[in-house]
Amino acid sequence: MKKIVVAIGILACQQLVAQLPEDALRASWTVPSGTARQQAIGGAMGSLGGEISSNFVNPAGLGFYKTREIVISPGFRLLQDKASYLNTANGGQTASNFNLGTSGLVTSHTTYNGNNSVFSIAVNRTANFNNHVYYKGRNNYSSQSEQYAEEFSRSGYTIDSAIANPNGDVSYGTRSALYTYLVDTTTVNGQQQVISRAQNAGLLDQVNDVRTSGGITEIALNLATSLHDKWYIGGGIGIPIISYTREQHYQESDATGNAHNDFANYTYTEKYTSKGFGLNAKLGLIFRPSNAWRVGLAVHTPSLLGVTDKIHTFMTSDLEDFSKPQQVSSGDLDAAYGPVNSVNYNIYTPWRFIASGSYVFGGGESNVKAQKGFVTADVEYVTTRTAHFKPENTGDGSAPDNYYDAVNAAIKDIYKNYLSLRMGGELKFNTIFARAGAAYYTNPYQDSKELKADKLFLTAGTGYRNAGMFFDLAFVMQFSRDVNFPYLLSDKNNLVSALKETGGTVVLTVGFKF
């Protein structure tokens, strides 16, 4: 598996703004948010119905509505990330942000034959990218600068022509490394070789500090209907809007104490932004064989996202006796040789299939006042390996088809389809409700022994409903594991940082029926 990741690393370096397999995972290994009620029961909303969150899980659940409703769900999320790298434990970094759970409008109309016809428009933050990853360690094995040396060696360019290359087939990182003499050429036994001066040290202190922000916000428009209060059918379209920013500060410094080996340190900073929007569809069915039992099925088509990436970089290097300190930015390179700092492409996210069941205590839908609570569970299957990229042939420096073919092949080799399991319940005490739940998202990596990754959520909440108003409050505790590669090389096993994240989300939902 590591060698597959490496192959993509080489190709990725050769693009101005590189699409990597992890970009596909970022858009697919997502945790649906929702109203406070939905989040308090572990996110399980595939068969329950009568909730505006059904827009983003199973739109057939909207068919249970018999009134109109307006809802808003503000929330706050706090996440702490701890990383282990090269046997060095790194303290937790925190990231926090305000979030918007499912909010919107539901309208219901009873047709002449007694069935319901329902329309809903809602908005939800379906993915949250806010995070802060920090780790450091002492490395006598490899350097990130070797990645730049590999790209230059394979480019076929001279140093001057690679630095001056405005076509997007040599990355800003490599051009900057050449400009600041971090990567250079030398003659050994009559043969020219590409070298990285950071390798002169042999022992490096490495620091990687990455902050990410943004998310995917989706607008949903759905129609649903009920047939004799037995069958509920719904469907509609979603308009996902993606906004992602990654700010990276990476540094390597000589840990030997030798002040005359032509390397003291270098620093590389990068701001990468990805923005776009797209379209998807959701279809759902719920069957209620009795007042107590409900079963549901839902299908989410892939989202087709049109995305534009931009990148801005800055590099400094101190090479001791070899040269005075050097620095260069992507803006400097653009000003001197021409700007090509954006690329357009399409992302196709995975299919999602959801099966669900619910049991309602006391009365069922025919007697709402007699209901005492429910238990519910969802199983979701996500086809991560079907996610893929396609170029947008606009003549603006977009990567060629063979590059995307290689990335897509790596997605199939690196990732596997995964399951998420969600369950929860509610108890009703007249106008007061108590809720609890849990959710577990399995490992999306093929090499699950080497790459430990999963997500666990424990949830709880309460609610109040009376006289056409309702207030719900939820708390979600998150425990998750993932991995981060600081850089990718072709001739060595790649080092990985193991991440452990803990966090909490508080969500308040306020709604009015009219």
Image (spheres, grey):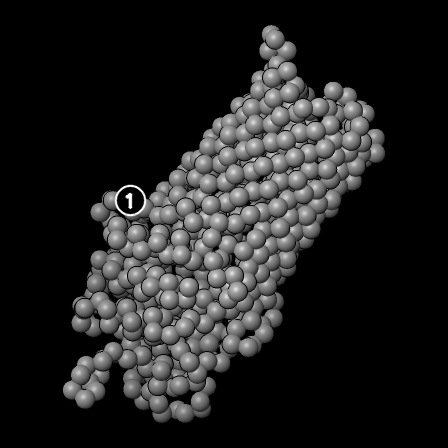
What residue is at 64 percent from the left and 15 percent from the top? 228
Q: Quarter-wise, where is residue 118 in the image? A: top right
Q: Work out which residue is located at the far right of the displayed protein and give it.
A: 429
Q: Quadrant of the N terminus?
A: bottom left
Q: Residue furthest left?
A: 190
Q: Residues within 10 Å of mark 1 (few under 14, many from 20)?
A: some
Who is closer to the viewer here, 507 or 399?
399
In the shown orientation, is residue 104 left or right of residue 188? right
Q: Image check: 316 left or right of 357?
A: left
The answer to whether any part of residue 56 appears in the image is yes
Could you tell me the amino acid type at mark 1? Glu
To which quarter of the image does residue 495 belong? bottom left
Q: Secondary structure at mark 1?
A: loop
- Residue at horizontal 49 percent and vertical 28 percent from the top: 236
Q: Is residue 250 above or below residue 109?
A: below
The image quadrant that residue 271 belongs to is bottom left
Q: Is residue 81 visible?
A: no
Query: Which residue lies under the disc numbered 1?
Result: 392
Image vertical order of residue 258 relative to residue 298, above or below: below
Give residue 12's position: percent from left, percent from top: 33, 60
Residue 507: give x, y in percent of width and height.
67, 44
